[in-house]
Amino acid sequence: MDKRYAIILAAGKGTRMKSQLYKVLHEVAGKAMVDHVLTQVERTKPNKIITIVGHGAETVKNVLGDRSEYALQEEQLGTGHAVLQAKDLLLGKTGTTLIVSGDTPLLTWETLSNLFEYHATRRSVGTVLTAKAPDPFGYGRIIRDHIGVVEKIVEQKDATPEIARINEINTGTYVFDNALLFDALSKIDTNNAQGEYYLTDIIEILKSEGHTIAAYQMDSFEESLGVNDRIALSEANKLMRHRINQTHMVHGVTLIDPESTYIESEVEIGNDTIIEPNVFLKGKTVIGKDVFIGSNCEIRDSVIESNVKIRSSVIEEAVVKSGADVGPMAHLRPKAEILENAHVGNFVEVKGATLGKGSKAGHLSYIGNVKIGKDVNVGAGVIFVNYDGKNKYDSVVEDHAFIGSNANIVNPVHIGKNGLVTAGSTITEDVPKESLAFGRAKQVNKEGRAKNYPHYKE
Ligand code: UD1
Ligand code: CA
């Protein structure tokens, strides 16, 4: 097979986004647009990938890392000028070069592969990926001659009213013979409405030199959506959400209402899991089989094993082992580990803590910096006091311990196996195994004295 190279254009500022963040770093389904593009490009197996960076070069490089090589475009003089920056890295190479924009996040590797193939069968020196747009405004238009051969591409701002009516658009994706690409790029000028070096001008240049140019029109316009502003960004998110949700449903996940289920690109979900509306699954979350995720949950970068039940909760960088149940209204924060069959109930916050197998924290607790063993009961309103204003301290609660309601466990303490902390105690010292600990004031009753108080009635 012919050698393949790829150039991703990602140097633009994205003025129309009105943002501090560089355009190609805006996220679609939780992943930077340029990362989506790179992921699909990688799957076409190019011998070399070069990303053109400029605005926010360092930030873009940090996001993509060593998956790509980089060429710097110091001034953004247009898409043609951007591609030219890859010249040194591709000089003298024979093969086919794919050019794709960092702002078309929905393009798939299947389409890119079809484009390479079409290009090869047509024996053209350049092939443009085109689509029919319901509203072509803003895109470059494809001009074909009377027998349908591509002649040139005209940008929106350079279009006559007649050209503006053409609805076949340039998706900004092309393949070119590598040597001819850079040869033609040296001939473009800035003679246009935007005073920029247009990549699209090389079509006309190559044609005038007698080369064959082809256009490959794909079926779906949606894949070619170019994101230049926030309106297109929301449209891209919607389309990507639909695509992701379809994939999960095909793999056996029940989504009660896919329209209101927000699953980011990297999330994995096992079959027979049921997800109710208004759920957000983010980052590198992995969810097992037969899990129930009730409405209004937000789960990020967490592992949820099989047969877990979660209702209306926020879970971040946490692990929930199989058979456990969480919520409603629980908050699992980083390094919370809920082991097999444990129960975390309403208004319970867990952070940097392990709740052992079969243990229960049913109501209104803060469980911070503690390792709790198995079959421990954490009563209502128990607080692990883990912070003295400067440092955090850790406690340990051994198996089968029982912590009465409204106890304050002041870290660091060790509560031994089968230890019992009475309700309302403030525990500042270790509780040996099998011991009963009182850490509260002794009750005193003053007979008849309640008569002096306003609540009193005969
Ligand atoms: C471009 C095409 C247009 C096509 C559309 C598809 C040109 C002249 N126009 O227009 O025909 O219909 O894409 O979405 O190519 N960039 C750089 N350096 C620059 C300028 C741009 O790296 O100097 C990058 C941008 O970051 C972006 C991509 O190139 O990722 C496209 O640039 P953009 O300004 O969005 O071009 P469009 O106006 O959308
Ligand atoms: Ca664009």
Image: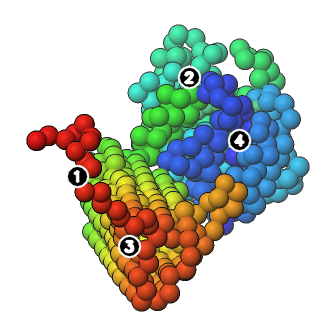
Mark nearer the N terminus (1 vs 2):
2
Task: Tell me the element at label 4.
Answer: strand
* Badge 2 or badge 3: first in the primary sequence: 2
Q: Nearer the viewer, residue 170 or 284?
A: 284
Question: Would you say residue 263 is visible in this rendering?
Answer: no
Crowding at dot 4, Cα within 10 Å, few <14 / some 14-19 / many 20+, comes out as: many
Label 4 C-beta lies within 8 Å of the nearest ligand 1 atom: yes
Closer to the eye: label 3 or 1: 1
Q: Amino acid at mark 3?
A: Thr
Question: Could you tell whether 295 is left or right of 298 in the image?
Answer: left
Q: Quadrant of residue 186?
A: top right
Disc with the residue nearer the chain's start (2 vs 4): 4
Q: According to the image, label 1 marks what residue?
A: 448
Residue at the top extreme of this rendering: 161
Secondary structure beneath disc 3? loop
Q: Residue at x 55, y 67 (%)?
A: 410
Kind of residue sitting beneath label 1: Gly
Q: Amino acid at mark 4?
A: Leu
